[in-house]
Image (cartoon, helix red, strand yellow):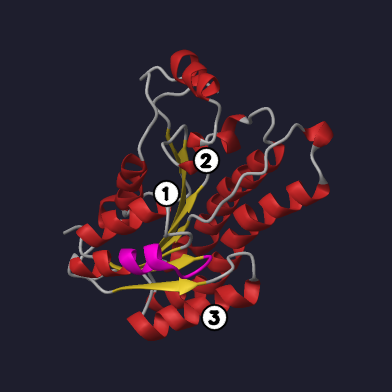
Amino acid sequence: MLLEGKIALITGGSRGIGRAIAYCFAREGCAVAFTCTAMNESVREEEAELQALGVRAKAYEADATDFATAERVISEVTADFGSIDILVNNAGITRDGIMLRMSEEQWDEVIRVNLKSVFNYTHAVTPVMLRARKGSIISVASVVGIGGNAGQSNYAASKAGIIAMMKTVAQELGARGIRANAIAPGCIDTDMTRAMPEEVLAGIIAERIPMHRIGTPDEVAQVALFLASDMSSYVSGQVIPIDGAMKY
């Protein structure tokens, strides 16, 4: 098992890509802590299913945008599990609209959830990883953060910020054995993609994705697994697109 004996914390781990990463890691022997915006039956089912894979698993209700809450969650996870070897920053939202018509609220909310949350949890977990002199920080960015996308200036800015942050963290913490990388999914089968008009999605698949299909959360999770494992022991400060050679 690639992650046997390791402990991961995944923000936004109760749905979509975060949920797929949680199951992928658990199948490889990793104990999994994950955050959610609200405890509900689906979250409890995920806890039980992860535990049924033979690993420790626990959900934590948390607002990813709150700095003090991130510190509390890291403290609780460390107390419950003993340490944190892997952090996956996955929490994210969209509030789309062209720049001219975008409200300040739309801008602030996306930056706060997508970008500030990465700062919050990376800042909070760093002392834990520094003491251990090891760790892998993986942040979910987007191809939009590389190539931009009309109608998503807030989302693009947040994801580009994540990429720059991970490159910087990799430089700051590399000497202490801590790696930081970003993954940049393209068009993936999640709730965000399903909310797109069918004709728009079909056009993207036909005209911009040479593989002529959208990706799956499991395909994103496999790349996260590589970055979490010792297979990527000399990979840091990188951004890995997962996009089927998408044109952007």
Q: Say what amino acid the circle numbered 1 marks.
A: Gly
Q: CA distance from mark 3 to mark 1?
A: 24 Å
Q: Disc 3 designates what residue?
A: 72
Q: Is residue 45 magenta?
A: yes
The residue lying at 50 percent from left, 72 percent from top is 61
Q: CA distance from mark 3 to mark 2?
A: 29 Å
The residue lying at 69 percent from left, 31 percent from top is 151
Q: Is residue 26 magenta?
A: no
- What are the residue bounds of the magenta stretch? 37-46
Q: CA distance from mark 1 to mark 2?
A: 9 Å
| Of callouts 1 and 2, the N-terminal one | 1
Q: Residue 174: x and y, percent?
A: 46, 61
The residue lying at 56 percent from left, 52 percent from top is 92
Secondary-structure class at tag 3: helix
Image quadrant assignment for residue 53: bottom left
Number of other residues with Cα within 10 Å of mark 2, as a class: few under 14, some 14 to 19, many 20 or more: few
Secondary-structure class at tag 2: helix
Number of other residues with Cα within 10 Å of mark 3, as a class: few under 14, some 14 to 19, many 20 or more: few
| Of callouts 3 and 1, the N-terminal one | 1
Q: Main secondary structure of the magenta part?
A: helix
Of 80 and 52, which appears nearest the observer? Answer: 52
Q: Disc 1 designates what residue?
A: 16
Secondary-structure class at tag 1: helix
- Quadrant of image for the C terminus: top right
Q: Residue furthest front?
A: 41
Q: Say what amino acid the circle numbered 2 marks.
A: Met
Answer with left or right where residue 246 lies relative to residue 159: left
| Of callouts 3 and 2, the N-terminal one | 3
Q: Disc 2 designates what residue?
A: 192
Answer with left or right where residue 176 lies relative to residue 172: left
**Residue 86 visible within the image:** no
